[in-house]
Amino acid sequence: MLTAIVGINWGDEGKGRMVDLLGSRQDIVVRYQGGNNAGHTVINHLGKFILNLLPSGILRPEIVNVMGGGMVVDIEHLCGEITRLREGGVQISPDNLKVSDRAIICLPYHVGQDILEEERLGDAKYGSTRRGIAPVYGDKYLKKGIRMGDLLEPEALKKQLAGIVAWKNLTIQGAYGAKAYDVEQLFGWLLQFGGPLREYICNTDLFLERAAAQDKRILFEAQLGALRDIEFGIYPYTSSSPTIAAYAPIGAGVPGRRLDNTIGVMKAYSTCVGEGPFTAELFGPAADALREAGGEYGAATGRPRRVGGFDVVASRYGVRVQGADELALTKLDVLSYLDKIPVCVAYEIDGERTGEFPSGRRLNQAKPVYEYLDGWHRDISGCRSIDALPAAAQRYIDYLQKAVDCPIRTISVGADREAYFTR
Ligand code: GDP
Ligand code: MG
C-alpha cells in the first residue's frame, strides 16, 4: 500500500503532524525531495520536535524511515538533528533510519552561493531560505553533485571533490569575487559529518522495492506544497524540486510503482513564507491577528509568514496538481476568533473575474475577490466529531469541500496528537 501525504498550498499546512498521525498505520515513512529548507513541527508525548531532514516517522520507534535519492542533504545539519532528537529521548539507529546512497550532499559552498546570490539580487531577491537548496539542485542537474554514497569511498571522494571545487570556485571567485573554497577544509567537513552517517547510508531503492513487493505500508512524505513545485508552482518563487505526489515513487526510489492513495493536507486559511505572488494576502491588523492566532512563524527560519484567507482558486489548483484522493483540513481551530471568515473566492485579472489559477504576469496582477462566511466564535479544539462542531464550522467545511471538489476526510482542530477526527 503506497500512500503520499502532500501539501495543497504553499507549504506549512501541517503535513508533519498528519504523517505523525497516519504514521501509526505505516511500516515505512520516506522523504522524497527537498532538504533542510523547510520544517515540520510534530508534538507528541516526548515533546515538540522540529524536523528539517528526518522523516516524521522517526518519532515512532517501530517505523523504518528512509531519506530518498530525490533529497539534498546538509550532513552537518543532519548530524545536529539526530543529536537533538536523541537528547529528546528519540531512538535512532540503522534499523529505523536509512539514507539513500543517491541523495545529493549540500555542501558549505552551496549555502555560500545561495547567500551571495540573494545579496547580489538585493531588492529583487527570491526570498531563499539560504540553505543552499537552489545551488545544490542546480549542481545535481549540471552533474557536479556529490552523493551520500560517495562518503563510503573517501579516497575516490577526495579526487572527485578537488575537481568539483576547482569548477565551483570559478563562480565563487570569478562571478561573485568572494573567497575561494579550500578542498582540504571541505574534505575535512565531509569526513567530520559524513563519518557518523556512514552506517545509515545504503541502497534504499532495493530496500523499498522489496518492501513494496511484500505489500508493506509505505508512506511518502512531501515537504512544501503544490504551489512550490518546480513545474507547477509559482515559478521562480518555487522550491527547486518537485513537491507533487507524482514524483514520490521516483524521488523515493520505487519508480514504476503507482500510489494507492494521495492525501492532500490543506490549511483552513492561507500562509506563504518568502517572496512571490500571494494573491489572497491580508495586511495590517487583520493579518497580524491571524498570524498570532495561528502561530505563523517559519519552523526552519523563524520568519513571520505572510497570511491570508482561504484561497479557493489556488487550493482547487493545488488539489488538481497533486491528484489528491482525499483531504485533511488543518488549523480550523485557528479561525475560532473571527466573527466573519474571509475567503478568497476568485481572482480579478485585467478587470475580469476568474477561477482558474494563472501564471506569469497574470498571476502577478491578480487581485483577490473576497467574500465572508459566518464565524462560530467558540473554542472547537475539544471537538472530536463533525456533529460536535458548531453549525457555522460545519458549513465552512462543506463550503471548502465543494469549492475544491475533493472530499475532506480528516479535520484537525489543534496541534496535539489527539486533536482531530475523521469522517
Ligand atoms: P508542515 O511544514 O506542513 O509540516 O507544517 P509546519 O509544521 O511548518 O506548520 C504547522 C504548524 O501548525 C505546526 O506548528 C503544528 O504543530 C501546527 N498545527 C498542525 N495542525 C494544527 C491544527 O489543526 N491546529 C493548530 N492550532 N495547530 C496545528
Ligand atoms: Mg513547514
Image (cartoon, grey):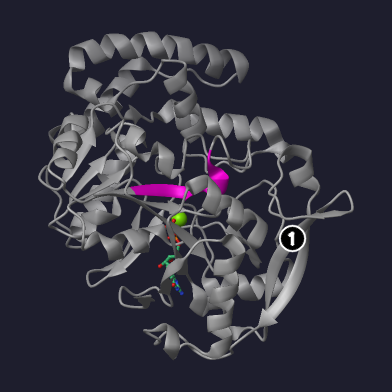
Q: Position of residue 375 (x, y in %)?
A: 63, 85
Q: Nearer the viewer, residue 274 or 318?
A: 318
User: Residue 140 or 183: which is nearer the viewer?
Assistant: 140
Q: Quadrant of residue 259?
A: top left
Q: Say how many tags the image has.
A: 1
Q: Where 376 sits versus 89, above or below?
A: below
Split into quadrants, the picture shows ligand 2 in the one at: bottom left
Q: Which residues are magenta?
A: 221-229
Residue marked by disc 1? 346
User: At 21% from the left edge and 47% from the top edge, which residue is drawn?
Assistant: 65
**Is residue 174 left or right of 108 when viewed as pictured?**
right
Q: Residue 414, located in which quarter of the rendered image?
A: bottom left
Question: Can residue 268 be seen in this snapshot?
Answer: yes
Outermost residue toward the right in this view: 351
> What amino acid is labelled 1 in the image?
Ala
Q: Image quarter for residue 205?
A: top left
Can residue 226 be found in the magenta stretch?
yes
Q: Secondary structure at mark 1?
A: strand
The residue that appears at 51% across and 75% down in the rendered structure is 332
Q: Where residue 367 sits: x, y (%)?
A: 80, 56
